[in-house]
Amino acid sequence: MNRTPLVGIILTALGLLGYLIGVVTPYPGRAFSITGMMVGITLIAIGNATQPEEST
């Protein structure tokens, strides 16, 4: 199993949770939750990408 999409899903979920908590209660560093979500979505996209076909 490819771990990249799994790490992306976890990072996206943690970023979303951090963002929702930051909306209710401001805390230092809450802007990193958005960065975490962007990186998580990128990892999901990279992990689900298909390998290029080899030309013969």
Image (cartoon, rainbow, N blue to C red):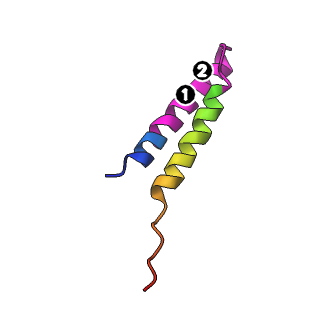
Element at label 1: helix
Q: Please give the residue where the numbered disc 2 appears in the rendered image.
A: 21
Element at label 2: helix
Quadrant position of the C terminus in the picture: bottom left
Q: Please give the residue where the numbered disc 1 appears in the rendered image.
A: 17
Point out residue 35 in the picture as x, y percentages from the top left corner: 63, 34
Could you tell me which residue is drawn at 41 percent across and 44 percent down? 6
Tell me, yes or no, whether the highlighted magenta stretch contains residue 13: yes
**In this view of the protein, which residue sits in the foreground, 51 or 35?**
51
Q: Which mark is residue 47?
A: none
Which amino acid type is shown beneath numbered disc 1?
A: Leu
Could you tell me which residue is drawn at 36 percent across and 51 percent down? 2
In this rendering, the answer to whether 50 lies above or below 31 is below
State which quadrant residue 26 falls in.
Answer: top right
Q: What count of labels does the image hold?
A: 2
In this rendering, the answer to whether 41 lies above or below 22 is below
In this rendering, the answer to whether 25 lies above or below 32 is above
In this rendering, the answer to whether 5 lies above or below 11 is below
Point out residue 28 in the picture as x, y percentages from the top left corner: 66, 13
Q: Are marks 1 and 2 in contact (CB under 8 Å)?
A: yes
**In this view of the protein, which residue sits in the foreground, 48 or 54?**
54
**In this view of the protein, which residue sits in the foreground, 25 or 31?**
31
- Seen as rendered, the residue at the extreme bottom is 56
| Distance from Cα at disc 1 to Cα at disc 2 | 6 Å
Which region of the structure is painted magenta? 9-31
Point out residue 37 in the picture as x, y percentages from the top left corner: 59, 37
Which amino acid type is shown beneath numbered disc 2?
A: Ile
Q: Crowding near pointer 2: few (<14 within 10 Å), some, many (20+)?
A: some
Could you tell me which residue is drawn at 51 percent across and 47 percent down? 43
